[in-house]
Image (cartoon, rainbow, N blue to C red):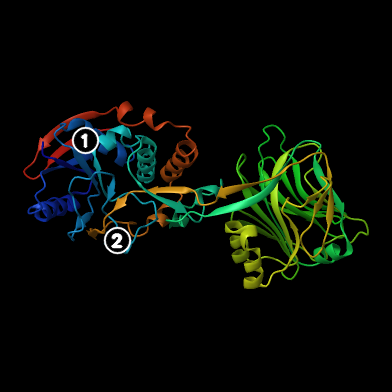
Amino acid sequence: MKDKLAIIVPYRDRQEHLDVFVPHMHEFLKDKGIDYTIFIAEQTDDRPFNYGKLCNVVTKEVGKEYTYFAFHDIDMLPISDDCDYSYPDSPTHLATNVEAHDNKLPYPQYFGGVILINREDFETANGYSNEYWGYGFEDLDLLYRLQRSGAYLEKFYDLNQTYSRLDEFDILPYRIENVEPTLKKKVNTIEYTKLDKNSYFKGRINNIMRGVIQNSFSISLWFNDTEVEFSKKILMVLEGMDTGLFLDNGYVISQIWDNNKKPYDVSIKYNKNKWNHVVFSYNSHENTLSISLNNNTNVIKIPTDFILHQEYAYMNISDDVSEVLIGSIIIFDSHLSSDVVSDLYFDGFKKIDLIKNKYGVATSNIFNFKSLYKNSLLLDGGYCINHLKLFGNTTPNNIEEDITPELYLPIRLDGEYKSLVHEHDADIIKKYYMHDPDIEENSDIFFYDVLTNKLDYKSIGLSTLTYTILDIQNRKDYELIRIVT
């Protein structure tokens, strides 16, 4: 059986665009050897526009002879032969060079405008979600469904680890425009130990180390919080200098006290049951305290005259009431720039000498949990030479942690599209941040329900589609399907 294409165009109140789109498509496809029909899916009710649901309805209404679909914005007109509407073996994105988008993708995972999907892949993914009313996110949701349902997508890695940088107070809690695809994943080797209840390290801070902490300094380490019930715990503290890194109710906190015994802290949300890289940095020149988690940084301004210079000071790693996996601890005698933090995150101990030569930063303390002497001392490999006594039991270990999460993108063709004038079409990302209630609700659905798998794609979509067809009109150049959503 010859493949047949259904070009499905969600539509409402855009007659001037419809009058241009239909004849342009027929002219463009007339010598391409493609058997096709244009279906205009008109939403006739007053509810917010639902692009995905309109697409679903048409795929249900047209016959099985249509073996693949083009879901098509009405304001995009193909103008190059790279806009290939032939049968796709896998999900394919055509609208990659759109005039209104300055001929570039609005964001790396953009899967809108014009896409091709064969019937089998679409139905296996349960179609679009029906839950996105108003603008946005039905394309990201469909891409996620296709990945979950086993459709072929190209595998990349997100160098920027976008989906580990939660900002729950933002309209988009994950900044999708920051996704940075790369073909090569990065792996960091973490030297760590598990410190369970009653197991911790503690040792006297010597004069050299006290000199380091009196000015700018930074602490870099990896941790994995696997404990279910206990929420408050120590990662690393400098007793007597009232400085440290703590975990508290899902946040990692860097804290410092001034000479008036007033505490200042800055925090950032972390992921449980996952390796996290944290850098705590004090800048004595700019009077700032910062914390970076997996390359995402929060900074606060603080007063001067900070560290308590007590004669007796101790360094603690973990505590005697909680458990944590902790590793690759490095202390620097300077504030670290974002470039150094990034290199530590991606390469860590593997390139510590290169980092030192490249940026001129000195590593005053290095605890890699390989240097246990008679199971009693953790030997510092830095120039401060602090020795910490082990209380309890621990076994050094190492793990290779993938720090570039997998990212799946559709096949993309280098198609060029002319744009019909449409308000706010030039910058999709700006539109996402316009405080539109529909956009905010759609964002919540995708980021908090779909990505967390609270919503099963099999439970919402083609399988749960409800609608009413007012009529189907066979026009001269297209079929009009009038739909109540």
Residue 58, which numbered label? 1
Q: Position of residue 68 (x, y in %)?
A: 20, 40
Q: Nearer the viewer, residue 345 or 451?
A: 345
Q: Nearer the viewer, residue 344 or 253?
A: 344
Point out the image quarter for the N terminus. top left
In screen coordinates, is 240 left or right of 289? right
**Residue lying furthest front in this view?**
374
Which mark is first along the chain, 2 or 1? 1
Question: How many circles with numbers are drawn on the protein?
Answer: 2
Q: Residues within 10 Å of mark 2 (few under 14, many from 20)?
A: many
**In the rendered image, which quarter is residue 385 located in?**
bottom right
Q: Position of residue 337 (x, y in %)?
A: 64, 66
Q: Position of residue 197 (x, y in %)?
A: 78, 35
Q: Which residue is located at x 51 percent, y 56 percent? A: 160
Q: Which residue is located at x 19 percent, y 31 percent? A: 61
Q: CA distance from mark 1 to mark 2?
A: 27 Å
Helix, strand or loop under label 2 = helix
Determine if residue 433 is in view: no
